[in-house]
Amino acid sequence: MSSRTIIAFDFGTRSIGAAIGQDITRTARALRAFKAQDGSPDWRQIEALLKEWQPALVVVGLPLNMDGSEQPITARARKFANRLHGRFGVQVALHDERLSTVEARADLFSHGGFRALDKGSVDAASAVIILESWFEQQP
């Protein structure tokens, strides 16, 4: 079995976190967070990331309410995923991201206290959690 590179995004209206992982090791690490203007990133930066890593798949976190219902940002995350596919031709999967930000904040805080909780670190760590959770659900 050959290893595939997978990138995950934690979509937000002001910041979009990114993480990278390998499906053979089923592990992920934070890459960075991209500034966004009302949900729109600098697409050239996203393109550069995709060209550098050439992922076989991109996983986008799907923000849902705790009961599984959609919220206003859910549609925006879907739109971001559709734009990734449309602009760059990458295969995109959506993944339930409930509690990823809460988990990321707790993890970062336990390792570095309040100074570790800058928005970019939290968003990139959330992308790691989204990707590792996605790996756990794959056969």
Image: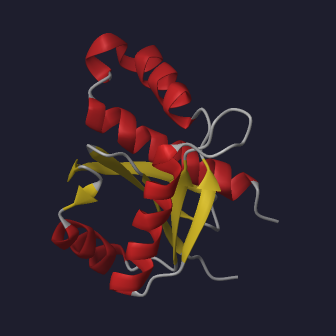
Q: Is residue 21 left or right of residue 45?
A: right
Q: Quarter holding the N terminus? A: bottom right
| Residue that protrudes farthest toward the bottom in the picture | 89
Q: Is residue 41 above or below residue 6?
A: above
Residue 37: give x, y in percent of width and height.
19, 51
Question: Which residue is pictured at 35% across the width and 12% down the height?
Answer: 113
Q: Quarter holding the C terminus? A: bottom right
Question: Which residue is pictured at 38% across the width and 74% down the height?
Answer: 83
Residue 129: give x, y in percent of width and height.
55, 43
| Residue that protrudes farthest toward the front in the picture | 72
Q: Nearer the viewer, residue 9 or 25?
A: 9
Q: Is residue 37 above or below residue 108?
A: below
Residue 16: give x, y in percent of width and height.
33, 50
Q: Is residue 124 left or right of residue 40?
A: right
Can residue 20 be seen here? The reply is no
Q: How is the image coloured?
A: secondary structure
Number of numbered discs: 0
Please tell me in which quadrant of the rendered image residue 14 appears: top left
| Residue that protrudes farthest toward the top in the picture | 113
Please tell me in which quadrant of the rendered image residue 115 appears: top left
Can residue 124 be seen here? The reply is yes
Question: Which residue is pictured at 43% across the width and 56% down the height?
Answer: 76
Residue 126: give x, y in percent of width and height.
47, 40
